[in-house]
Amino acid sequence: MRWEALFGDLEAQLAAARAASDEAAAADLLMMEQARVAFADRLAGSVAQGLKVRTGNGQGFSGRLAYVGAEWLVLAEGQRSVLVPFAAILSIEGLGRAVAPRPAGVHARLGLASAYRALARDRAQVSVYAGSPATVSEGTLDRVGADFLEVALVPPGEHRRAANVRAVVALPFAAVAAVASHP
């Protein structure tokens, strides 16, 4: 009888050790899996959710996450869209728990320069937030290089014509916190 109790106790200890080992292994696997999640994939799990994005220069933007690119996100903020480079983001509030690979669409592969070039091609009226504290340049994107963009400063509501351009400002990508396009 004593032997049965001893073996029963040993079996219970072994089962408990196995369960603890399995839980530790599962926790390690979860941590390893989380370590492989890219920022863009973390954001892709929250597409269509409302987010608050704070940039390093103190600007804040709130809106529905519309797109996630290779190096940027777009928030739908009322009637305008705000493109925010990942490098400018200080924090994001409102992410859900989901993680998803970015959709295979074209925008998911486009880098920051390509996103800026799309705005330049459309001659969209934009507000470019740059510097710290943030300054806002209103106008159209005239030129997009490999690592810089140029904004033709045009009064709000005016079309980009030579007579309306007050100045052209060149900004390195690293200085740009966000580009908001207007309807």
Image (cartoon, rainbow, N blue to C red):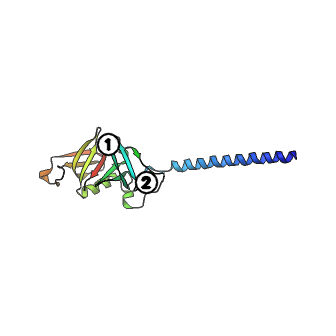
Q: Is residue 55 left or right of residue 39?
A: left
Q: Residues within 10 Å of mark 1 (few under 14, many from 20)?
A: some
Displayed quadrant of residue 47:
bottom left
**Rendered image: mark on residue 113:** none
Q: Is residue 156 left or right of residue 22?
A: left
Q: Position of residue 103 (x, y in %)?
A: 42, 60
**Rendered image: mark on residue 59:** 1
Q: Position of residue 130 (x, y in %)?
A: 28, 43
**Residue positioned most to the left:** 163
Q: Quadrant of the C terminus?
A: bottom left
First of labels 2, 1 by sequence position = 2
Q: Is residue 72 above or below residue 57?
A: below
Displayed quadrant of residue 136:
top left
**Residue denoted by label 2:** 46
Residue occupying the point 80% across, 48% down: 8
Q: Name the secondary structure under disc 1.
A: loop
Q: Position of residue 142 (x, y in %)?
A: 22, 52
**Residue positioned most to the right:** 1
Along the line of sight, the residue nearer the viewer: 59 or 24: 59
CA separation in Å, label 2 and label 1: 21 Å
Q: Position of residue 88 (x, y in %)?
A: 35, 44
Residue occupying the point 28% across, 57% down: 118
Residue occupying the point 41% across, 46% down: 93
Q: Name the secondary structure under disc 2.
A: loop
Q: Amino acid at mark 1?
A: Gln
